[in-house]
Amino acid sequence: MSIEVIKNFVEDLKESPDKSAVTFYHYTNTEGLVGILNSQELWLTDSKFLNDPSEKQHGLLISELANLNVWNTLMSEVIASIEKEEQPDKSALHFLDESIKRHKEFAEKEYMASTYLMSFCEDGDLLSQWKGYSNYGKGFSIGFKKSFLSDISGFHLGRVIYSWEEKIKILEKVTINFIDKYKVNIQEFNNELLTDFFNLIGFISIFFKDYFFKEENEWRLVSVPELKQKPDCKATNSGVTPFIKIQIKPLEEKIDKIILGPKYDSRYIYSLKNWFPIEKIELSKGSLV
């Protein structure tokens, strides 16, 4: 896969709209908090096993539209060449034509690269997050230092893109860069190149989400496709889900703050400090009800 294309893409996602944001919050239930504090690990889930399958379909739809836009541009160039009685270069056009035809087929193949992720939010006390991810307010939001999350080897931290126009623009740019980089190979079209292209598009689409969720201001910590770490498996409501681990020892150097959900009794603040090595971590209670 084109590592340079990925690096350039992720660099564009590192800037937060809120320039002052230095802490990103992961919402979880009681079991999730206890698991993180006891193991001193983060568990990143395989993106193929997201709770909401519509996220994957949304990324595929955006990718198809972006490819169609690039295809139309390339077709215009071919037509212009013919009108000038020049020999048009149809190799890139053929590559895109095949990618559009076979996009869904390749996306459903099990040999596509696995990518692991964990979600965070800029706001540690957001009603929609308490409802969706923290047992309707009887859970926790764990505030991790942005400096830690953005400096983990083998992983990229990036903001989620909600704007339809920005998604299309990004994928058009990535597609054109990929074609330019591999133009010689495209002339000898093969499935390996197409798989490489879809893995790249799949990685980028992980940072795309429907505009309906814009309030979340979500960030995602995502593994690079070349990561060789062997995954573990956990039992979930949907079956068996692969995940990988990141060590977060010592906790007090990685976590800034823990916020109890608004439905929790404030006395748990003192209990948490007695149960876990988090004496220097700020604890508070969510204000939303």
Image: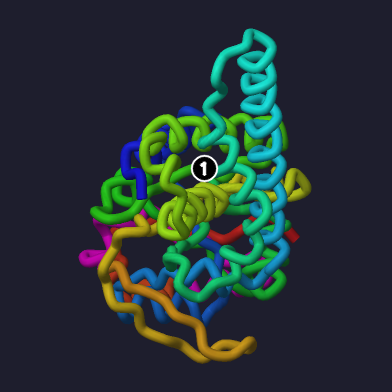
Q: Which residue is at a point 55% across and 64% down the rendered structure image?
A: 27
Q: How is the image coloured?
A: rainbow
Please give left or right for residue 57 compared with residue 106 in the image: right
Residue 261 is one of the magenta-drawn residues:
yes
Tell which of 128 and 262 is nearer to you: 128
Residue in view at x 57 percent, y 50 percent: 205
Q: Does the segment drawn in magenta span residue 150?
A: no
Q: Residue at x 51, y 91 (%)?
A: 235
Q: Where's residue 258, x and y in %?
A: 46, 61
Residue 247: image x %, image y %?
Answer: 26, 68
Quadrant the C terminus occupies: bottom right
Tell me what residue is drawn at x 63 percent, y 31 percent: 70
Mark 1: give few (<14), some (14-19) or many (20+) Cα within 10 Å: many
Quarter holding residue 275: bottom left
Q: Is residue 227 above or below residue 31?
A: above
The answer to whether residue 221 of the structure is visible from this angle is: no
Q: Is residue 124 visible?
A: yes
Q: Position of residue 222 (x, y in %)?
A: 42, 56
Look at label 1 and name its amino acid: Arg
SS class, disc 1: strand
Depth check: 229 or 90 in front? 90
Q: Would you place residue 266 above or below residue 167 in this image?
A: below
Q: Is 210 left or right of 196, judged from the image as shown?
A: right
Q: Which residue bears the numbered disc 1?
A: 159
Q: Which residues are magenta?
A: 247-268
